[in-house]
């Protein structure tokens, strides 16, 4: 099993969600997060005081998948979330040892 | 014989026929007088009802400026952890000042006394009932006048809270405001508006200062006291390095809109009647606010490239402050001018001057109310028009010039006296009170509590409770 963590632009959540549904992904967790990579922040002015906002709002998706789905999912996310500009985000993959369905103690890929 | 009889009859005939008619006429004249008197009474009573309706409405509008208007305006400008603490300061003053006012405050402001302070004969609301006080407002019950003036006494100290936001103990705030109300507000209100006050323009003061709705009494006193507080208390922990942007400009936006609407009660209500002067002040108020939005947001647009929502609403408040002393003395075009100047001037005060000197007037109580109030009070002396409001008359009752532009250069001097008295009283009074509170119960929360926020440390609650819903 593999965990896919994708950090994407806020506006790309709908396209990515749709692309994932199309290839049969059944579950995901979505988080509103803040952070920055190489993309620079922006400045805001309140009564003349300048504030640099370098932690930018982003969307983080978390999915745990059977290994055979991973490449298809990565492709779906990159093609749906890409604009070609700095700030499109990143995808991280990592191994997952086990999964447990709380309802009935089912384990492994069957619990996904 | 018969001839004589007929002659008598002819002579008497007119009397016989007319006498009842003459008697009737006398009776009907008395009747008419009575009816006239009754009519006059009815007209007076109708006017009184009309004026009273407007003044009660205005009283409610001015209360709405403090809560929720100012509470929301200030509440949105602070950080999330201080939102309740900040709103609570305004709300608490609605209660505390009201109690003081009922017991002694009204008497100290509006009872006849000496040049500087009112007497004590209205203590505990004695003699404040349905009868009008013709020196102040001859067509409304004195009780209406009293409750209207109370709302000014409430909002004035509440304005100061913007300067020491996010770092003052609630207890210290409460004690400070009680003392401030006695030492600064009551004397200033008496001097400008009370019987015998030496700045009173309507009742023949020595230096007649034109202050229609409280430019000096409300905004200069609160704004200058705010600056003194900011300097005395020092900066917030982390200021100016740590970013402290407003946690919700949305709340401030709603608050500013409520302030704008409430200000019609503040300024147009200061006509103390529902007549043409109220209309004129209403129009001036609205025009100045609008022009100040253009001024502030325009200046910001030129300098930063973007007109901000916070800039626009701050501009409206600056314009409303500046027109306050002038509202009942100037026409619509002068109001536009005052508003535009105030918008640009207050923007400059808040953005440039504050940054230059580094004082932490957290929510710009001085930059908007102190600076805008001073500017407005002086411009009132320049723009005041006798056509709008004939304030000064000679012995024959002829109207004299009001402002500098009409040829009464002396008025600017009177305005300066009023402003100087307000500045002096605010500085000295506030310093003394701060010192007293500082050495007795202490002014600031501990650094730890400040970081934690006033909501939790002062009130044991949170403005935005984090709840996982089932």
Image (cartoon, coloured by chain):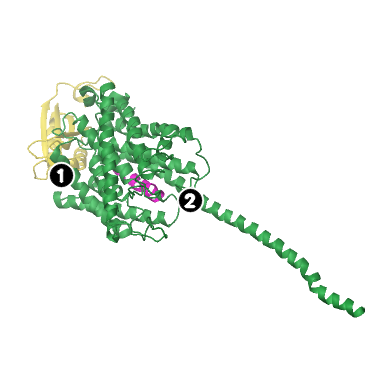
Chain colours: A yellow, B green
Q: What element carries label 2?
A: helix
Q: Is mark 1 on a helix, strand or loop?
A: helix
Upstream in sequence: badge 2 or badge 1: 2
Provide the residue span drawn in magenta. B252-269
> Vertically, is B30 above or below B113?
below
User: In this view of the protein, can residue B45 be seen by the observer?
Assistant: yes
User: In this view of the protein, can residue B247 be seen by the observer?
Assistant: no
Residue under the image location 28 percent in, 42 percent down = B421
Alpha carbon distance from label 2 to label 1: 44 Å
Residue B440, x across and y down, in percent? 28, 21
Mark 2 surroundings: few (<14), some (14-19) or many (≥20) residues within 10 A: many
Q: Mark 1 lies on which chain?
A: B
In the image, taking residue A49 as reference, residue B337 lies left or right, namely right
Q: Mark 2 points at which residue?
A: B51
Residue A105, x across and y down, in percent? 25, 19
Q: Mark 1 points at which residue?
A: B352
Residue B337, x across and y down, in percent? 26, 57
């Amino acid at each position: 099993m593999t965990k896919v963590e994708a950090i994407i632009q806020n506006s790309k959540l709908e396209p990515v969600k749709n692309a994932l549904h199309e290839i049969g992904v059944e579950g995901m967790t979505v988080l509103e997060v803040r952070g920055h990579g190489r993309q620079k922040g922006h400045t805001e002015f309140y009564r003349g005081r300048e504030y640099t906002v370098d932690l930018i709002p982003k969307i983080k998706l978390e999915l745990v998948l059977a290994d055979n789905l991973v490449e298809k999912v990565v492709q779906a996310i990159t093609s749906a979330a890409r604009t070609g500009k700095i700030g499109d985000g990143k995808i991280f993959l990592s191994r997952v040892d086990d999964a447990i369905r709380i309802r009935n103690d089912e384990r492994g890929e069957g619990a996904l | 014989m018969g001839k004589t009889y007929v002659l008598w009859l002819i002579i008497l005939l007119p009397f016989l026929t007319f006498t009842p008619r003459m008697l009737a006429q006398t009776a009907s004249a008395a009747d008419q007088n009575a009816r006239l008197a009754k009519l006059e009474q009815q007209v007076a009573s109708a006017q009184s009802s009309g004026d009273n309706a407007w003044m009660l409405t205005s009283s409610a509008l001015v209360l709405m400026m403090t809560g929720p208007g100012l509470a929301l305006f200030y509440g949105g400008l602070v950080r999330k952890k201080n939102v309740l603490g900040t709103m609570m300061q305004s709300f608490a003053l609605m209660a505390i000042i009201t109690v003081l006012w009922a017991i002694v405050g009204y008497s100290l402001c509006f009872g006849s006394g000496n040049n500087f302070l009112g007497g004590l004969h209205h203590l505990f609301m004695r003699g404040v009932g349905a009868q009008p006080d013709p020196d102040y407002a001859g067509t409304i019950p004195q009780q209406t006048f009293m409750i209207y003036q109370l709302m000014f006494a409430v909002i004035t100290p509440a304005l100061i809270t913007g300067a020491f936001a996010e770092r003052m103990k609630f207890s210290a705030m409460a004690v400070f405001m009680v003392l401030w109300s006695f030492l600064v507000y009551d004397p200033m209100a008496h001097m400008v508006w009370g019987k015998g006050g030496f700045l009173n323009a309507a009742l023949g003061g020595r230096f007649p200062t034109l202050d229609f709705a409280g430019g000096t009494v409300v905004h200069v006193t609160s704004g200058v006291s705010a600056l003194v507080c900011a300097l005395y208390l020092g900066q917030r922990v982390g200021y100016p390095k740590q970013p402290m942007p407003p946690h919700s400009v949305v709340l401030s936006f709603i608050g500013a809109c409520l302030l704008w609407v409430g200000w019609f009660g503040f300024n147009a209500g200061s006509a103390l009647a529902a007549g043409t002067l109220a209309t004129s002040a209403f129009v001036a108020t609205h025009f100045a606010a609008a022009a100040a939005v253009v001024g502030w947001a325009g200046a910001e647009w030129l300098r930063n490239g973007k007109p901000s929502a916070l800039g626009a609403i701050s501009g409206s408040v600056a314009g409303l402050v500046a027109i306050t002393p002038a509202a009942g003395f100037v026409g619509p075009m002068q109001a536009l001018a005052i508003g535009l100047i105030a918008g640009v001037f207050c923007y400059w005060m808040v953005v440039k001057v504050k940054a230059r000197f580094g004082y932490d007037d957290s929510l710009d109580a001085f930059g908007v109310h102190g600076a805008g109030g001073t500017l407005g009070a002086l411009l009132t002396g320049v723009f005041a028009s006798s056509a709008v409001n004939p304030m000064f008359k000679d012995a024959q009752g002829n109207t004299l010039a009001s402002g500098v532009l009409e040829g009464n250069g002396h008025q600017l001097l009177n305005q300066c006296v009023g402003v100087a008295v307000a500045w002096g009283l605010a500085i000295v009074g506030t310093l003394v009170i701060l010192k007293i509170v500082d050495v007795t119960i202490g002014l600031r929360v501990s650094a730890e509590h400040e970081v934690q926020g006033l909501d939790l440390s002062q009130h044991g609650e949170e403005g935005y409770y984090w709840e996982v819903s089932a």
